[in-house]
Amino acid sequence: MSSMSKRRWQVLVLLSVGVVFSLVLGILAGSVRVPIWHLFDTELGKEALILRYIRLPRVLMGFLVGGALGISGAAVQSSLNNPLASPYTMGVSAGASLGVSLYFLTGFNFFSVGIPAVGFLFGMGTVLFVMAFAKRVDPFMQNQTVILAGMVFSLFVNGVLTVILALSKETLEKTVHWQMGSLGANGFSELRVFIPFLIVGTVGILRRSKELDVMAMGDEQALSMGVDVPKVKRRVLVYASLLTGSAVAFTGAIGFIDLVVVHVIRKLVGSNHRFLLPFSFLFGGSFLVLTDLFARTVLSPRELPVGAITALIGAPFFMWVFFNKRRR
Protein backbone atom coordinates (compact mmCIF):
# COMPACT_ATOMS: atom_id res chain seq x y z
CA MET A 1 0.00 0.00 0.00
CA SER A 2 1.42 3.38 -1.04
CA SER A 3 1.84 6.22 1.45
CA MET A 4 -0.99 8.19 -0.22
CA SER A 5 -3.38 5.22 -0.05
CA LYS A 6 -2.50 4.72 3.61
CA ARG A 7 -3.12 8.39 4.31
CA ARG A 8 -6.51 8.24 2.56
CA TRP A 9 -7.58 5.34 4.74
CA GLN A 10 -6.46 7.23 7.83
CA VAL A 11 -8.38 10.33 6.73
CA LEU A 12 -11.47 8.20 6.04
CA VAL A 13 -11.34 6.75 9.56
CA LEU A 14 -10.88 10.21 11.07
CA LEU A 15 -13.74 11.63 9.02
CA SER A 16 -16.02 8.74 9.98
CA VAL A 17 -15.28 9.29 13.66
CA GLY A 18 -15.74 13.03 13.16
CA VAL A 19 -19.13 12.53 11.53
CA VAL A 20 -20.41 10.36 14.38
CA PHE A 21 -18.95 12.71 16.99
CA SER A 22 -20.42 15.85 15.43
CA LEU A 23 -23.89 14.32 14.96
CA VAL A 24 -24.10 12.96 18.51
CA LEU A 25 -22.72 16.14 20.05
CA GLY A 26 -25.02 18.29 17.92
CA ILE A 27 -28.06 16.34 19.14
CA LEU A 28 -27.08 16.25 22.82
CA ALA A 29 -25.61 19.71 23.38
CA GLY A 30 -27.73 22.81 23.79
CA SER A 31 -29.27 25.19 26.29
CA VAL A 32 -31.21 22.21 27.69
CA ARG A 33 -29.21 19.09 28.57
CA VAL A 34 -31.07 15.97 27.48
CA PRO A 35 -29.69 12.39 27.64
CA ILE A 36 -29.64 10.69 24.26
CA TRP A 37 -31.91 7.79 25.30
CA HIS A 38 -34.83 10.23 25.33
CA LEU A 39 -34.54 10.19 21.54
CA PHE A 40 -36.09 6.71 21.62
CA ASP A 41 -38.80 7.35 24.19
CA THR A 42 -42.19 5.98 23.15
CA GLU A 43 -43.89 8.63 25.29
CA LEU A 44 -43.31 12.04 23.77
CA GLY A 45 -42.35 14.04 26.82
CA LYS A 46 -40.60 17.40 26.72
CA GLU A 47 -37.13 15.86 26.43
CA ALA A 48 -38.12 13.52 23.60
CA LEU A 49 -39.78 16.36 21.69
CA ILE A 50 -36.66 18.52 21.96
CA LEU A 51 -34.37 15.79 20.66
CA ARG A 52 -36.65 14.27 18.04
CA TYR A 53 -38.34 17.28 16.48
CA ILE A 54 -35.97 20.18 17.11
CA ARG A 55 -32.35 19.03 17.38
CA LEU A 56 -32.39 15.89 15.22
CA PRO A 57 -33.78 17.51 12.02
CA ARG A 58 -31.59 20.57 12.59
CA VAL A 59 -28.43 18.48 12.91
CA LEU A 60 -29.33 16.30 9.91
CA MET A 61 -30.06 19.37 7.78
CA GLY A 62 -26.78 20.94 8.87
CA PHE A 63 -24.83 17.82 7.92
CA LEU A 64 -26.50 17.48 4.51
CA VAL A 65 -26.23 21.20 3.69
CA GLY A 66 -22.57 21.27 4.72
CA GLY A 67 -21.92 18.18 2.63
CA ALA A 68 -23.69 19.71 -0.38
CA LEU A 69 -21.63 22.90 -0.10
CA GLY A 70 -18.40 20.92 0.29
CA ILE A 71 -18.85 18.67 -2.73
CA SER A 72 -20.17 21.49 -4.93
CA GLY A 73 -17.19 23.66 -4.03
CA ALA A 74 -14.77 20.88 -4.97
CA ALA A 75 -16.51 20.36 -8.31
CA VAL A 76 -16.55 24.06 -9.21
CA GLN A 77 -12.90 24.61 -8.29
CA SER A 78 -11.81 21.70 -10.45
CA SER A 79 -14.06 22.47 -13.43
CA LEU A 80 -12.89 26.11 -13.48
CA ASN A 81 -9.33 25.21 -12.42
CA ASN A 82 -9.33 28.01 -9.84
CA PRO A 83 -8.79 27.48 -6.08
CA LEU A 84 -10.86 30.58 -5.27
CA ALA A 85 -13.89 29.64 -7.38
CA SER A 86 -17.14 28.53 -5.75
CA PRO A 87 -20.86 28.36 -6.53
CA TYR A 88 -21.20 31.71 -4.79
CA THR A 89 -18.82 33.16 -7.38
CA MET A 90 -21.38 32.16 -10.00
CA GLY A 91 -24.07 34.27 -8.34
CA VAL A 92 -26.10 31.65 -6.46
CA SER A 93 -26.22 33.61 -3.21
CA ALA A 94 -26.83 36.96 -4.92
CA GLY A 95 -29.69 35.58 -7.02
CA ALA A 96 -31.30 33.80 -4.07
CA SER A 97 -31.06 36.95 -1.94
CA LEU A 98 -32.72 38.99 -4.68
CA GLY A 99 -35.55 36.47 -5.00
CA VAL A 100 -36.16 36.37 -1.25
CA SER A 101 -36.19 40.19 -1.01
CA LEU A 102 -38.76 40.38 -3.82
CA TYR A 103 -40.81 37.74 -2.02
CA PHE A 104 -40.82 39.85 1.14
CA LEU A 105 -41.51 43.05 -0.83
CA THR A 106 -44.55 41.69 -2.67
CA GLY A 107 -46.04 40.20 0.49
CA PHE A 108 -46.95 36.88 -1.13
CA ASN A 109 -47.46 33.97 1.24
CA PHE A 110 -46.86 30.44 -0.02
CA PHE A 111 -46.70 29.00 3.49
CA SER A 112 -43.48 27.19 4.43
CA VAL A 113 -42.34 26.52 0.85
CA GLY A 114 -42.40 30.15 -0.26
CA ILE A 115 -38.92 31.33 0.71
CA PRO A 116 -37.12 28.05 -0.20
CA ALA A 117 -38.85 27.87 -3.59
CA VAL A 118 -38.13 31.50 -4.49
CA GLY A 119 -34.55 31.34 -3.22
CA PHE A 120 -33.82 28.20 -5.18
CA LEU A 121 -35.43 29.40 -8.42
CA PHE A 122 -33.66 32.76 -8.41
CA GLY A 123 -30.30 31.26 -7.38
CA MET A 124 -30.46 28.61 -10.07
CA GLY A 125 -31.78 31.09 -12.64
CA THR A 126 -28.84 33.42 -11.99
CA VAL A 127 -26.32 30.67 -12.67
CA LEU A 128 -28.09 29.57 -15.86
CA PHE A 129 -28.07 33.17 -17.09
CA VAL A 130 -24.36 33.54 -16.30
CA MET A 131 -23.56 30.32 -18.17
CA ALA A 132 -25.68 31.34 -21.18
CA PHE A 133 -23.97 34.74 -21.28
CA ALA A 134 -20.49 33.20 -20.95
CA LYS A 135 -21.21 30.71 -23.73
CA ARG A 136 -22.44 33.46 -26.04
CA VAL A 137 -19.32 35.55 -25.43
CA ASP A 138 -16.95 32.57 -25.48
CA PRO A 139 -18.24 29.32 -27.08
CA PHE A 140 -15.41 27.38 -25.37
CA MET A 141 -16.44 28.76 -21.96
CA GLN A 142 -12.91 29.42 -20.81
CA ASN A 143 -12.48 29.58 -17.05
CA GLN A 144 -11.69 33.29 -16.91
CA THR A 145 -14.81 34.11 -18.94
CA VAL A 146 -17.12 32.09 -16.69
CA ILE A 147 -15.67 33.49 -13.46
CA LEU A 148 -15.69 37.08 -14.74
CA ALA A 149 -19.29 36.75 -15.98
CA GLY A 150 -20.36 35.36 -12.61
CA MET A 151 -18.64 38.11 -10.63
CA VAL A 152 -19.97 40.92 -12.84
CA PHE A 153 -23.54 39.63 -12.76
CA SER A 154 -23.33 39.08 -8.99
CA LEU A 155 -22.33 42.72 -8.56
CA PHE A 156 -25.24 43.79 -10.76
CA VAL A 157 -27.74 41.66 -8.82
CA ASN A 158 -26.37 42.97 -5.52
CA GLY A 159 -26.86 46.51 -6.85
CA VAL A 160 -30.50 45.78 -7.65
CA LEU A 161 -30.91 44.18 -4.23
CA THR A 162 -29.45 47.26 -2.52
CA VAL A 163 -31.95 49.52 -4.29
CA ILE A 164 -34.85 47.30 -3.21
CA LEU A 165 -33.68 47.19 0.40
CA ALA A 166 -33.23 50.98 0.46
CA LEU A 167 -36.87 51.43 -0.55
CA SER A 168 -38.40 49.19 2.11
CA LYS A 169 -37.32 49.05 5.75
CA GLU A 170 -39.45 45.96 6.43
CA THR A 171 -37.91 44.13 3.48
CA LEU A 172 -34.44 45.19 4.66
CA GLU A 173 -34.90 43.67 8.10
CA LYS A 174 -36.31 40.38 6.84
CA THR A 175 -33.76 39.96 4.03
CA VAL A 176 -30.77 40.76 6.23
CA HIS A 177 -32.01 38.25 8.82
CA TRP A 178 -32.35 35.60 6.10
CA GLN A 179 -28.90 36.40 4.67
CA MET A 180 -27.29 35.75 8.05
CA GLY A 181 -27.95 32.04 7.64
CA SER A 182 -29.64 29.74 10.13
CA LEU A 183 -30.55 26.08 10.52
CA GLY A 184 -33.14 26.66 13.25
CA ALA A 185 -36.25 26.84 11.07
CA ASN A 186 -35.82 23.42 9.46
CA GLY A 187 -37.76 20.29 10.33
CA PHE A 188 -38.39 16.92 8.75
CA SER A 189 -40.69 18.41 6.09
CA GLU A 190 -37.85 20.64 4.83
CA LEU A 191 -35.50 17.65 4.90
CA ARG A 192 -37.85 15.64 2.70
CA VAL A 193 -37.91 18.44 0.14
CA PHE A 194 -34.14 19.00 0.20
CA ILE A 195 -33.00 15.36 -0.06
CA PRO A 196 -34.11 14.76 -3.70
CA PHE A 197 -32.12 17.85 -4.82
CA LEU A 198 -29.17 16.58 -2.78
CA ILE A 199 -29.26 13.13 -4.38
CA VAL A 200 -29.56 14.42 -7.96
CA GLY A 201 -26.77 16.98 -7.56
CA THR A 202 -24.40 14.68 -5.68
CA VAL A 203 -24.81 11.73 -8.05
CA GLY A 204 -24.45 14.04 -11.05
CA ILE A 205 -21.12 15.38 -9.77
CA LEU A 206 -19.77 12.00 -8.66
CA ARG A 207 -20.40 10.61 -12.15
CA ARG A 208 -18.06 13.30 -13.55
CA SER A 209 -15.14 12.49 -11.23
CA LYS A 210 -12.90 11.12 -14.01
CA GLU A 211 -13.51 14.14 -16.26
CA LEU A 212 -12.81 16.45 -13.32
CA ASP A 213 -9.47 14.70 -12.75
CA VAL A 214 -8.48 15.58 -16.30
CA MET A 215 -9.97 19.09 -16.30
CA ALA A 216 -8.01 19.96 -13.17
CA MET A 217 -4.89 19.84 -15.36
CA GLY A 218 -6.27 22.57 -17.64
CA ASP A 219 -8.72 22.90 -20.51
CA GLU A 220 -6.15 22.34 -23.26
CA GLN A 221 -4.90 19.13 -21.67
CA ALA A 222 -8.47 17.90 -21.19
CA LEU A 223 -9.40 18.66 -24.82
CA SER A 224 -6.32 16.81 -26.06
CA MET A 225 -7.44 13.76 -24.05
CA GLY A 226 -10.89 13.73 -25.63
CA VAL A 227 -12.94 15.44 -22.90
CA ASP A 228 -15.76 17.66 -24.14
CA VAL A 229 -14.76 20.47 -21.79
CA PRO A 230 -17.62 22.96 -22.41
CA LYS A 231 -20.26 20.22 -22.07
CA VAL A 232 -18.78 18.74 -18.88
CA LYS A 233 -18.24 22.20 -17.42
CA ARG A 234 -21.85 23.20 -18.02
CA ARG A 235 -23.19 20.03 -16.42
CA VAL A 236 -20.91 20.23 -13.40
CA LEU A 237 -21.80 23.87 -12.81
CA VAL A 238 -25.52 23.09 -13.09
CA TYR A 239 -25.27 20.22 -10.59
CA ALA A 240 -23.14 22.30 -8.21
CA SER A 241 -25.59 25.20 -8.47
CA LEU A 242 -28.48 22.80 -7.86
CA LEU A 243 -26.85 21.70 -4.61
CA THR A 244 -25.91 25.19 -3.47
CA GLY A 245 -29.16 26.81 -4.57
CA SER A 246 -31.34 24.27 -2.77
CA ALA A 247 -29.14 24.52 0.36
CA VAL A 248 -29.21 28.31 0.40
CA ALA A 249 -32.97 28.26 -0.11
CA PHE A 250 -33.52 26.46 3.21
CA THR A 251 -30.73 27.90 5.35
CA GLY A 252 -29.92 31.35 3.97
CA ALA A 253 -26.48 32.41 2.81
CA ILE A 254 -23.88 30.25 4.56
CA GLY A 255 -20.64 31.03 2.79
CA PHE A 256 -17.01 29.91 2.73
CA ILE A 257 -17.67 26.25 3.61
CA ASP A 258 -17.23 25.34 -0.06
CA LEU A 259 -13.84 27.07 0.02
CA VAL A 260 -12.38 26.03 3.38
CA VAL A 261 -13.42 22.38 3.25
CA VAL A 262 -12.03 21.64 -0.21
CA HIS A 263 -8.59 23.09 0.49
CA VAL A 264 -8.22 21.12 3.71
CA ILE A 265 -9.25 17.83 2.10
CA ARG A 266 -7.10 18.40 -0.99
CA LYS A 267 -4.08 18.89 1.26
CA LEU A 268 -4.83 15.61 3.03
CA VAL A 269 -5.84 13.23 0.23
CA GLY A 270 -4.70 14.86 -3.00
CA SER A 271 -6.69 15.84 -6.09
CA ASN A 272 -8.10 12.46 -7.12
CA HIS A 273 -11.82 13.19 -7.26
CA ARG A 274 -12.84 9.65 -6.32
CA PHE A 275 -11.66 10.63 -2.85
CA LEU A 276 -11.79 14.43 -2.92
CA LEU A 277 -15.53 14.65 -3.62
CA PRO A 278 -16.94 12.22 -1.00
CA PHE A 279 -14.39 13.31 1.62
CA SER A 280 -15.35 16.95 1.03
CA PHE A 281 -18.98 15.96 1.61
CA LEU A 282 -18.20 14.26 4.93
CA PHE A 283 -15.94 17.03 6.18
CA GLY A 284 -18.29 19.78 5.03
CA GLY A 285 -21.21 18.17 6.85
CA SER A 286 -19.31 17.73 10.11
CA PHE A 287 -17.86 21.24 9.86
CA LEU A 288 -21.27 22.89 9.54
CA VAL A 289 -22.81 20.82 12.35
CA LEU A 290 -20.02 21.83 14.74
CA THR A 291 -20.12 25.46 13.59
CA ASP A 292 -23.87 25.58 14.15
CA LEU A 293 -23.40 23.97 17.57
CA PHE A 294 -20.96 26.74 18.50
CA ALA A 295 -23.32 29.42 17.16
CA ARG A 296 -26.24 28.27 19.30
CA THR A 297 -24.36 27.49 22.53
CA VAL A 298 -21.56 30.07 22.91
CA LEU A 299 -24.03 32.76 24.11
CA SER A 300 -26.85 30.43 25.17
CA PRO A 301 -29.79 30.96 25.32
CA ARG A 302 -29.13 33.54 22.58
CA GLU A 303 -28.17 32.19 19.17
CA LEU A 304 -25.66 33.65 16.72
CA PRO A 305 -26.19 33.39 12.93
CA VAL A 306 -24.21 30.41 11.69
CA GLY A 307 -23.43 32.29 8.46
CA ALA A 308 -21.58 34.91 10.49
CA ILE A 309 -19.45 32.24 12.18
CA THR A 310 -18.50 30.59 8.88
CA ALA A 311 -17.63 34.02 7.47
CA LEU A 312 -15.36 34.79 10.43
CA ILE A 313 -13.55 31.51 9.77
CA GLY A 314 -13.65 31.61 5.98
CA ALA A 315 -12.66 35.21 5.23
CA PRO A 316 -9.15 34.97 6.75
CA PHE A 317 -8.75 31.56 5.12
CA PHE A 318 -9.73 33.06 1.75
CA MET A 319 -7.09 35.78 2.12
CA TRP A 320 -4.46 33.22 3.09
CA VAL A 321 -5.19 31.11 0.01
CA PHE A 322 -5.17 34.18 -2.27
CA PHE A 323 -1.88 35.65 -1.05
CA ASN A 324 -0.23 32.23 -0.78
CA LYS A 325 -1.15 31.57 -4.42
CA ARG A 326 0.27 34.94 -5.49
CA ARG A 327 3.57 34.26 -3.69
CA ARG A 328 3.91 30.91 -5.48
Image: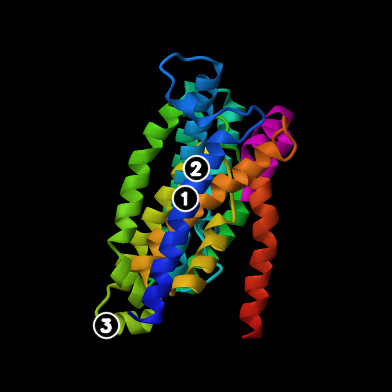
Q: Amino acid at mark 3?
A: Met
Q: Residue at x 51, y 47 (%)?
A: 21
Secondary-structure class at tag 3: loop
134 over 167 or under it: above or below = below
Q: Nearer the viewer, mark 3 or mark 1?
A: 1
Residue 227 vs 200, above or below: the answer is: below
Q: What's the mark number on residue 23?
A: 2
Residue in the foreground of this view, choosing between 69 and 231: 69
Packing grade of label 3 (10 A; few <14, some 14-19, many >=20) is few
Callout 1: helix, strand or loop?
helix
Q: Is residue 172 left or right of residue 19?
A: right
Residue at 49%, 71% in the rendered image: 268
Q: Nearer the viewer, residue 155 or 237?
A: 237
Q: Position of residue 298 (x, y in %)?
A: 72, 40
Query: Circle 1 is placed at which residue position?
Result: 19
The image quarter containing residue 8 is: bottom left
Magenta-colored stretch includes residue 168: yes
Say if the magenta span includes residue 208: no
